[in-house]
Image (cartoon, rainbow, N blue to C red):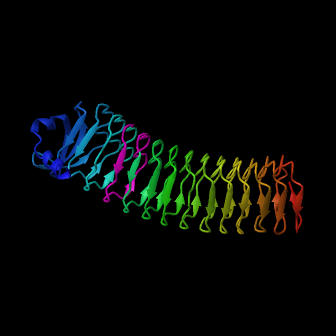
Amino acid sequence: MKWIGLSCLLLIPASAWAQFNYTTNNGAITITKYTGSAGAAIIPATINGLPVIGIGNNAFNSSTNLTSIAIGSNICSIGDRAFYFCTKLTNVPLPDSVTNIGREAFEYCLKLNGIAVPSSVKSIKTGTFFNCSSLTNIALSSNITSIADNAFSSCASLTEITIPNSVTFLGSYVFDSCYKLASVTLTNGFSAIGDFAFYSCANLTNFTIPESVTNIGDSAFKNCSSLRDITIPDSITNIGASAFYGCSALSKALIGNNIASIGDNAFGNCTGMNEIKLGNQIKNIGSFAFYSCLSLTNITIPNSVTNIGDYAFSQCYALQGIYFAGNAPRVSSTAYYVANKLTNYYLPGTTNWG
C-alpha cells in the first residue's frame, strides 16, 4: 500500500498543485501555504519536475477541514507550526526522508491518534505534539537524542511511552498533564529529568529512574497521585523543589547516597509515605521537604545533614521518633511544627535549634 500511495503521487494532475503556494530555491520546492479546503490533501514528490523537499513554517496552520494528508517521499523538513491547530487531522504518515520536525508542528491536532517518528529524526522539539489530546500511540526510534520542553504535554489519551536509550535529555513539561499515562519505560542514557516533566500524570503507578540520571527537576513528578514507590539511585545529586509533592500514594522513598540537597516541598503532602531512607551524603533538607507526610512514624537523619529547613516535617501527625545519626544539625524551630505525637529523640550530639 505504501508503494501504491507513492506511485499515486506521481499521477496527480497539475491542477491539484494550485492548492499550494510554494517557493523554489536551488532547484527544490518548499510548500509555504495550503490554500485548499478539502478534507484530504496530497503533497507530491515533485512539482514541474522539481523535488518537493520542505513543508514551511505555518504552511497548514489552522486548516481545520483537513482530515488526512499524504506526504511526498522527498520531504526532508516539516517547519514550525506546519500543522498547528489542524483540529480534524487524524493520521500523518511521515516518510523516512524526514529529518526535521519543527517546533509546535502538530500542536493542537486534537484528533491525531498515532504517530511514528522516522529514524532519520534526531530530536523532538518544543511543543511538537502539545495538546494532541487523542494521541494514544507514539513510536520513537532509537536515533532520538532529545525530547524538548512540552513535546507531549497534555496528550491526555496517551497511556504508555518507551523512551529509547539514545535519549540524553528530557525537557521541562515534556509529559505534563498526560493524565492517562500509566507506563513509562526509561533506559540508561539521559542525565536529567526536567522541571514538571511528568507533572499531574495521575495514572502513573511505577517509575524506575535509570542510574544515568543525575538531576530530578522542580515539580518533576508533582501530583502523580498514583505513584507508589520510588528509588532514587546513587547517580542523583539533586532533588528539585516539589519534585514529588502531592504523590499521595507514595509509601516509600529510598534516596541515594550522592544527593546533597532535598529541595523545598520535595515530598510535601505525600500523605501515604510511611518509610523514608535518606542517603549518607545529604547536607540540606529543604523547607516543607516532608510537610504533611501523614503516615510517617520514624525518620533517621544522617550525620551528613547540616541543615533542616522551616516546617520540614510540619504536620507529620503520626511522626513519633527522630534519630540523629551524628551531631544534630541546625534545625529550624518550626521543623516539627504540629508533629504532635513526636515523643522520641535520639541525639548523640548537641542540637542547635532555631
| Residue 204 at x, y percent in the picture | 55, 50
Q: Quadrant of residue 216?
A: bottom right
From the viewer's perspective, is 159 left or right of 93?
A: right
Q: Nearer the viewer, residue 3 or 188?
A: 3
From the viewer's perspective, is 113 left or right of 170?
A: left
Is any atom of residue 51 visible in this view? Answer: no
Residue 87 position (above or below residue 92): above
Q: Quadrant of residue 324?
A: bottom right
Main secondary structure of the magenta stretch: loop
Q: Number of marks in the image?
A: 0
From the viewer's perspective, is 180 left or right of 236?
A: left
Residue drawn at (20%, 37%) of the image: 21
| Residue 69 at x, y percent in the picture | 25, 41
- Check residue 117 for magenta coloring: yes
From the viewer's perspective, is 156 left or right of 65?
A: right
Q: Nearer the viewer, residue 252 or 141?
A: 252
Residue drawn at (39%, 51%) of the image: 138
State which region is magenta: 110-135
Is any atom of residue 181 visible in this view? Answer: yes
| Residue 25 at x, y percent in the picture | 18, 49
| Residue 280 at x, y percent in the picture | 72, 69
The quadrant of the image that shows the C terminus is bottom right
- Check residue 42 for magenta coloring: no
